[in-house]
Amino acid sequence: MQQVIDKLNKDKKEQWPEFFDAISKELAELKYNLTEKLPIKSKLLSEIVKYVFIAGGKRLRPALCFLSAKATGGVTDKHLVLAELTELIHTASLVHDDIIDSAHLRRGEETVNSLWNDKISVITGDFLFGQASVKLGELENTEIVKIYANVLSDLCDGEIEQYSSKFDTKISWEKYLHKSTAKTASLFAAACKSAAILNNQSLEDIKLANNFGLYLGIAFQIVDDTLDFTSNSTELGKAVASDLKQGIITAPTLFALSASDDRAKQIQVLIESRFNEREEDFKKAINLVIELEGCKKAAMMAKEYIEKANASLSFVKDRTFHTYLTSVGDYVLSRLN
Ligand code: FPP
Ligand code: MG
């Protein structure tokens, strides 16, 4: 286990995006708190939680807490707690998501359900949600409690909506955007908004901080949905086009389905027949989505949402942090390169 942890630590350092440098001290403290300071009695749970947090990605959501805090007056101890609970919720939802998706890989590493099993994953996710609730209480701020309680409901709402609309080629853009907001953008918005609330910003600036996170989160999800088609499995750290295989219709497929071209109908038939359970038909559907420029159009849509996010940055008076927050959007889009 120690070897895995050392390797993961090394890999993560090498992929660190540049704007994180401005908050490296805060992120190091966050990582220490998540990997060393959670009160866990069980040796097994402690091992799993460490594994999950050391494998744990770029910490984009805590980064948003810290950058929004610095952009509105500075990082306080409460912002550290906010960042921690935000990452706890995100990680818990991924642990549960991997059970729902029967996923074996996340970010190129084995999932908890694969290394251990589904039952242990359910408990691990619940433990992380529990710890997030403890931290939420520590903030002693009922407004933020309400925001995060809504985020938890949104996550479930988005996930159920996604589950219940599998293989539905008639899914509307409105539903897709609602689902993306609920399962992803809601937490981004909560992080930015709550950071501003903790720094006693005006109602107008709090709303702008919320909108920045919201639009950035929608763009992030569209990019994620696009990468599902365009990356190979090594880059992706999971199976290619796993969304479409499961019948999850995302932006690239929606664009392809709405093209005025006979191939759009072909995609519809392939999806509705569940690819006739043939790998060949599944690959054909992926190729048609790409041919009909579904990914290209989705990338453009993500760019538009980043522009909307950046238009909300007037709540940031500090030029340096305005630039840093703009570069978060650039980073989200750069994942497509
Ligand atoms: C990953 O998205 C999944 C989410 C962002 C949310 C998952 C939410 C749940 C499982 C609900 C659980 C929440 C509570 C409060 C119990 P994705 O599937 O698009 O990304 P992926 O391809 O990386 O899995
Ligand atoms: Mg998933």
Image: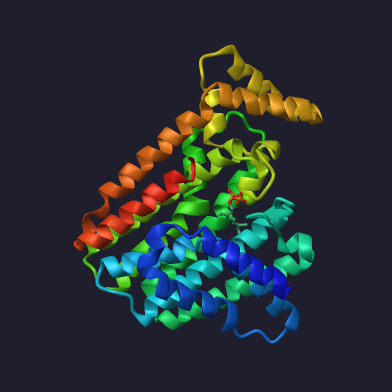
Residue positioned 74% across, 54% down in the render: 104
Q: Nearer the viewer, residue 202 or 90?
A: 90
Residue positioned 72% across, 64% down in the render: 112
Residue 84's place in the image compared with 16, above or below, is below
> Whole-percent x and y of residue 275?
75, 28
> Whole-percent x and y of residue 293?
51, 24
Considering the image in quadrants, where does the N terminus appear? bottom right
> Whole-percent x and y of residue 46?
68, 79
Q: Which of 147 and 111 is in front in this view?
A: 111
Outermost top residue: 262
The answer to whether 196 appears left or right of 120 in the picture is: left
* Location of residue 40 (image quadrant): bottom right
> Whole-percent x and y of residue 41?
69, 87
Q: Which of 262 and 324 is in front in this view?
A: 324
Residue 79's place in the image compared with 332, above or below, is below
Residue 258's place in the image compared with 218, above or below, is above
Residue positioned 66% across, 62% down in the render: 95
**Does residue 219 appear anywhere in the picture?**
no
